[in-house]
Image: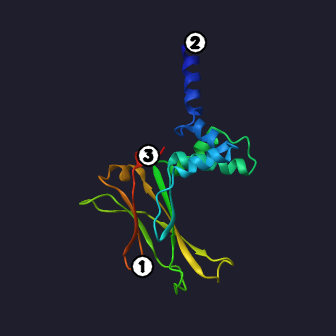
Amino acid sequence: MLTRTILMLATLAVMAPQVPDAREAMRLGRSQDDALYSAFSKGYHLTPSTPVANAEIITEFRRSVLIVREHMQRGEMGFTDHELDNEMKPHRGLVTFIVEVNLHPLNTYTRMPPYEMYVSLGSGVPPLAAPEIRRDPVYALGGPGAALLGVRLEATFPRDKIAAGPAPELIVTNESADVLWRARIDLTRYR
């Protein structure tokens, strides 16, 4: 009897979702209430200022909600906690930042400028560079060949290194290494 109980508990432990707050992520991702989802998403936006048009943070919890929502939009109503856990494995312990930077309206760029994004952890501490920065052009109506309006930057960093910094800030620089924008990062504000 004791062996059967131990096996049952072990099976339940293996089947239990590993994503923190998986049930809440499933509920928010499946929600048909656009106002609720919009309010949730708005809480993950950083304060933009010129030239940044939009800046947001994607934590593990928010990524879980985004994954569930994507599956729901594809009509996959049977998406489970276990499947969510599998899709979240490559994102564990990571935080992603997405920043859209507007270019000057009279810019003469023929190619996307090599803007950078990194996390300054505070004075006396080396900055945290992302292993990779994804850079996507933002064009005027008409797509490639049309006027280049901006650059969308996306980079992922280890959450624990940001949290350990005394005064972490997200920094965006231009091709001359001039700081275009900075925002204080307080990970305790986000799930």
Task: Point out the tag, 3 or 2, that comes first from the N-terminus.
Answer: 2
**Percent of width and height locating residue 70:** 67, 51
**Which residue in the structure is indicated by mark 2?**
1
Residue 119 falls in which quadrant of the image? bottom left
Q: Callout 3, which amino acid?
A: Arg
Residue shown at the point (53%, 79%) measured from the top left? 112
How crowded pointer 1 is (Cα within 10 Å; few <14, some 14-19, many 20+) is rated as few
155, 190: nearer the viewer: 190
**Kind of residue indicated by mark 2:** Met
Q: Position of residue 108 (x, y in %)?
A: 52, 87
Q: Given this view, does label 3 or label 2 mark the residue nearer the observer?
A: 3
* Helix, strand or loop under label 3: helix
The picture quadrant where one finds residue 126 is: bottom left
What whole-number distance in Å separates the C-alpha atoms at marks 1 and 3? 31 Å
Q: Position of residue 57 (x, y in %)?
A: 49, 55
Which tag is nearer the camera, tag 1 or tag 2? 1
Q: Quadrant of residue 25?
A: top right
Q: Is the N terminus in the top left, top right, bottom left or bottom right quadrant?
A: top right
Residue 51 shows in this picture: yes
The residue positioned 32% from the left and 58% from the top of the image is 121
Whether 111 is drawn above or below 18: the answer is below
Return the residue at label 3: 189
Q: Which mark is residue 24?
A: none
In the image: residue 151, left or right of residue 120: right
Mark closest to the chain's N terminus, 1 or 2: 2
The outermost residue toward the right is 75
Q: Amino acid at mark 1?
A: Glu
Residue at image location 42% in from the left, 76% down from the top: 174
Residue beneath disc 1: 175
Q: Position of residue 168 (x, y in %)?
A: 35, 56
Q: Is residue 185 left or right of residue 122?
A: right
Q: Tag 1's secondary structure?
A: loop
